[in-house]
Image (tube, rainbow, N blue to C red):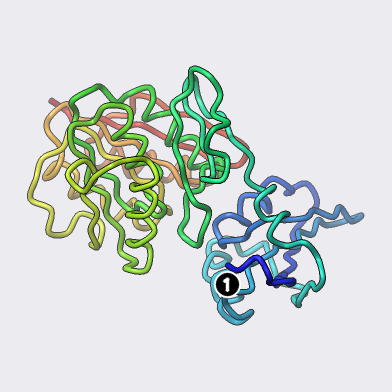
Amino acid sequence: MATSESYWWYITLETKAGDDEMLVSLAELCGSIGAEIQDLPLSVRSRLFFRSDKDLAHWLGEVNDVLESWPGVVVVDMGRVDNRPWHREWKEAFPPLPIGKGLVVLAPWHSGSEPVGRLPLYIHPKSAFGTGYHESTQLALEFLERYLQKGMSVADIGTGSGILAIAAAKLGASHVLARDLDPSVIVEVRENCALNGLSEKEVEVGEGDLLKGIDSLFDLLTANILFEPLVQMLPDLPRVLRPGARALFAGLSLRDRAPFREVLSRQGLVEIDEKTKGEWWGVVAEIPA
């Protein structure tokens, strides 16, 4: 987006009082560049801001798609904010973010300010999901840091910005497949890989629907996507994961916890770890040896 642009769009969401964290999480799922929270006597509102390089109808469509899974949240207002230093404020909305024991996520304009002792993941915050600022992405990165061993082959399904695939490669994976159903994010994934000095041999980027058409075996799988596609993918896991391999799942809310555990059990997968962060839950499952 050009630095000369002097406005951006906003869409205001409202839900019941006490759900502030959920509204903040929804902001990144929608592709928002930032949000403001307003507490009311019986409810809470969040004004989500969006880049003006696309029209308001586009962003409203993105918001409505996300809200299909959140029936308690409604759109109450939308419009345009003019005459603010948008470019500077947008960049300030993405400061370096330490994650886990040794990772840090940085927008490319923060290159050179990496904390000592942390592995940098450079991600340009564009339209693809996964800047690292969303709690579900943080859960997945923390799992990766814990369970990835050097030399492993990794599949990242629903890769979005490519942040998990990039982290896997920089943590020592021998080969990473980064896959997404949305062809529009593939260019962003490749750009982010280039920012991190990763070649196509290290991170293979491709378009595809979950695990369909994959005929390789992997040691580790990551998927930071929604409940329904995760459930659809589970029956195919034994076909693409070696016995004893693990799958790291995020993108699940706390209310998904019980039903997803039931599906894991029915599919014969063994839960070995779980984590929560805010309203979000992640889980690690193992393919029986």
Name the residue at the left extreme: 215
Residue drawn at (68%, 72%), measured in percent from left and top? 5
Q: Quadrant of the C terminus?
A: top left
Tell me how many marks there are.
1
Q: Amino acid at mark 1?
A: Asn
**Extreme residue in the right direction:** 41
When the figure is inspected, residue 185 is found, relative to residue 269, above or below; the finding is below
Quarter where residue 70 is shown? bottom right
Q: Which residue is at 51% across, 37% downward?
A: 105
Going 40% across and 34% down the picture, which residue do you hit?
283
Q: Residue at x 58, y 67 (%)?
A: 1
- What residue is shown with label 1? 64
Count residues near mark 1 (Cα–Cα under 10 Å), then give few for <14, some for 14-19, many for 20+.
some
Q: Is residue 6 above or below residue 240?
A: below
Q: Secondary structure at mark 1?
A: helix
Horizontal side of residue 83 vs 50, given as left or right: right
**Which quarter of the picture shows residue 109?**
top right
Residue 208 in the image, given as x and y percentages of width and height: 23, 62
Q: Is residue 109 left or right of residue 10?
A: left
As drawn, 144 above or below 164: above
Q: Residue 126: give x, y in percent of width and height.
A: 51, 59
State the image coordinates of residue 259 (x, y, percent, origin top left). 43, 45
Name the spot of residue 84 as percent of width and height, x first: 80, 65
- Using residue 164 as the reference point, say whether residue 78 is left or right of it: right
Judged left or right of residue 12, residue 114 is: left
